[in-house]
Amino acid sequence: MKEYKLAIVGATGLVGRSFIKVLEERKLPIKEYGLFASKKSAGKIINILGKDYVVNELTENSFNEGFDFALFSAGGDTAKKYAPIAAKNNCIVVDNSSAFRMEKDVPLVVPEVNFEDALNHSGIIANPNCSTIQAMLPLKALDDKYVIKRVIYSTYQAVSGAGRYGLEDLENTDNSKPLKKFPHPIYNNCLPHIDVFMNNGYTKEEMKMINETRKILHKPNLNVTATTVRVPVTNSHSESINVEFEKSFEIDDLFNTLKLFPNIVLLDNPKENIYPLAINATGHDEVFVGRVRRDESVKSGVNLWVVADNIRKGAATNAVQIVEGLISKLVK
Ligand code: A2P
């Protein structure tokens, strides 16, 4: 079997470390890794499957070494500058930032939902926003069966989605240190503000969810709205999703549709207090769905509670699954 060379850009970050963990677990045929971060991390040692690798400063020459794939999670500016350089060097990039997601020739991929889109890449594939990824699995399952006509998202997002500084702000429980990431204390608080505000009053995070949902489901005119909220949870995003359908449904049939979809775990037994929880989702790659109930205020609609590990399925695992899928199709 052919073995590949893979670069990780942002290897010292939360998602970067998780790329490594997931790659180790899933045993991809990678013979050599290249680890890159900013200048300040150059020289750090990271062990992968028993072998020590030195972290190098990311430069324009980093991709001269024949990498087949690169996983990027180092922010939009770094991606904009370096992903095209990698792609020019025949290295397929899966980028976790929002830099390329809405570009026409860049596939935006959740493997369980639209893996075929990845095959039409021009060197760069975008990993969707964490809160979009986890919503896509149940929405695709239900769209195929009942045809979605409207989606309302309300999210409860963990601080790990804001990187290391987000976690540090949550640990700052007595406000003794200046905040590093958020505009207000996150401890004991909820911030209806993720990413920057846009001219239409939505945040960029909300617009990402709206636009990315349309692109991944291939429904450019889908009615979608979102309110995204940062909550004082360390890890795993929770989402309330209200969905309206064109077609009618039987609730048992809808349960089965969700249950049969790859990598969805249905946890729905209210009598026993069983429903998805952030603390239980952390460390897992599946998307947990529960609180499934008919929306009695519309002709055909349902409410869902959807929880997933935002660093794993919402970022690292999804990106690694894309590479895994490409390797299995032998596109290289
Ligand atoms: P570094 O650790 O050297 O700052 P997080 O999202 O957890 O904050 O992680 C961001 C990741 O992106 C880190 O690995 C960080 O490296 C990396 N990074 C940030 N800026 C750059 C840059 N200009 N070039 C390369 N890597 C960068």
Image: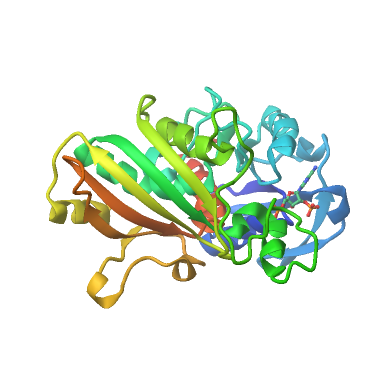
- Please determine whether, in this image, residue 32 is positioned above or below residue 187: above
State which quadrant residue 76 falls in. Answer: top right
**Quarter of the C terminus within the rendering:** top right
Whether residue 16 is visible: no
Task: Give the residue drawn at x 19%, y 33%.
Answer: 246
Query: Image check: 236 left or right of 176?
Result: left
Q: Residue 125: percent from the left, percent from the top?
A: 56, 35
Query: Image check: 291 left or right of 211?
Result: left
Q: Nearer the viewer, residue 48 or 103?
A: 103
Task: Give the residue drawn at x 51%, y 35%.
Answer: 207
Q: Residue 162: percent from the left, percent from the top?
A: 64, 53
Query: Image check: 288 left or right of 27?
Result: left
Q: Residue 193: percent from the left, percent from the top?
A: 59, 46
Q: How many marks?
A: 0
Pick out the residue farthest to the bottom: 272
Q: Nearer the viewer, residue 101 or 122?
A: 101
- Please determine whether, in this image, residue 248 is positioned above or below residue 185: above
Its colouring scheme is rainbow
Task: Give the residue drawn at x 21%, y 45%.
Answer: 297
Task: Give the residue drawn at x 22%, y 44%.
Answer: 301
Query: Image check: 270 left or right of 43?
Result: left
- Please determine whether, in this image, residue 216 is positioned above or below residue 232: above
- Please determine whether, in this image, residue 213 is positioned above or below residue 181: above
Q: Residue 263: percent from the left, percent from the top?
A: 36, 56
Pick out the residue farthest to the top: 104
Q: Nearer the viewer, residue 30 or 153?
A: 153
Whether residue 196 is visible: yes
